[in-house]
Image (cartoon, helix red, strand yellow):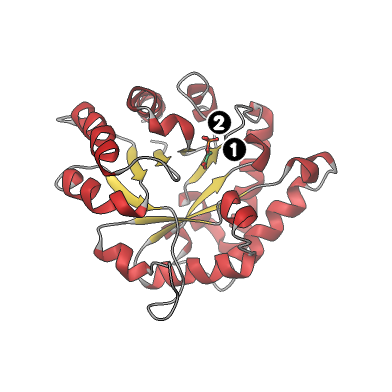
Amino acid sequence: MKSMLVAGNWKMNKNISESISLVSEILSWMNNKTLKSKVLVCPPFTSITSVQKLAEKTSLLIGAQNCHYEEKGAYTGEISPSMLKNAGCEFVIVGHSERRTYFLENDDIINKKILSLLAHNLKPIFCLGETLSERNSGMTYSVIENQILLGLKNISSEQITQIVIAYEPVWAIGTGVTASIEQIDEAHSFIRQNLTELFGKVANDVLILYGGSVNSQNCLEIFTIPEVNGALVGGASLIGSEFISIIESAETIAKSTQ
Ligand code: PEP
């Protein structure tokens, strides 16, 4: 069976009561179902505890959208991996293009975060992908290769399966423009091949998600691409019915590949 993960990145949206209402909708749909796909929500920090309380004793997974790599100290405004672990998170998104662009996070910082998360038994969702100008100038694959090499520096083949990769072409995030099936297929195969060269056979067990304007209408076709193991969903994860419909498509694929 193909392993599938549907992850919602809520970004800077939803206050506590809005978060409770969204997650309650998802949970009431999940109730009594044994899903073959994993379902994850990444609320803003302020909602994690409320969401975690609701999700306790359910199969809904909780993640955060960012962290610092240090354990503790004078880093005003930052949150450490152990704090997130303590709050009930299992996953943390790192390397999102919005953090690379607006908060100037580079490959070195991203690598430090990944190493720190693994040391705290948290699973990084490592985002990578090219900008439009990089794609237009034929640099897509060199950019991806470089991001993998630098982001996964000093990661062992024992650790790699704890990391989820999210291929997110920057030009497709929040734009309503989805990469074509061919573009996604090629990029995911390229990523899998790179991981195999670096880590050997275990690379086959690494989940590679696609992210970039995924919605209930386009997800099924994307999920049929062999090296796609689900999606990192931004905008569409903020609407309960949309997110549920994306999970249903992931279920269709998981069941059809049993
Ligand atoms: C994202 O935030 O990772 C993302 C893919 O956003 P959207 O689905 O809105 O493009």
Mark 1 neighbour density, 10 Å: few (under 14) some (14–19) many (20 or more): many
Question: In front here: 140 or 241?
Answer: 241
**Residue occupying the point 24% across, 33% down:** 21
Q: CA distance from mark 2 to mark 1?
A: 6 Å
**Residue occupying the point 49% across, 66% down:** 114
From the top left corner, tell me how far across and down residue 159 is, in percent: 45, 66
From the top left corner, tell me how far across and down residue 11 is, in percent: 45, 45
From the top left corner, tell me how far across and down residue 206 is, in percent: 48, 51
Camera sees residue 7: yes
**Residue occupying the point 58% across, 69% down:** 109
Residue for badge 2: 213
| SS of the residue under disc 2 | loop
**Residue occupying the point 65% across, 41% down:** 169
Answer yes or no: do the residues labelled 2 and 1 have beta carbons within 8 Å? yes
Left or right, 143 with reference to 191? right
Camera sees residue 156: no
Q: Relative to 38, does residue 122 appear above or below in the rendering?
A: below
Q: Say if disc 1 is inside 8 Å of ligand 1.
A: yes
Q: Quadrant of residue 116?
A: bottom left
Residue for badge 1: 173
Q: Say if disc 2 is inside 8 Å of ligand 1.
A: yes
Give amino acid for label 2. Answer: Ser
Left or right, 126 with reference to 239? right
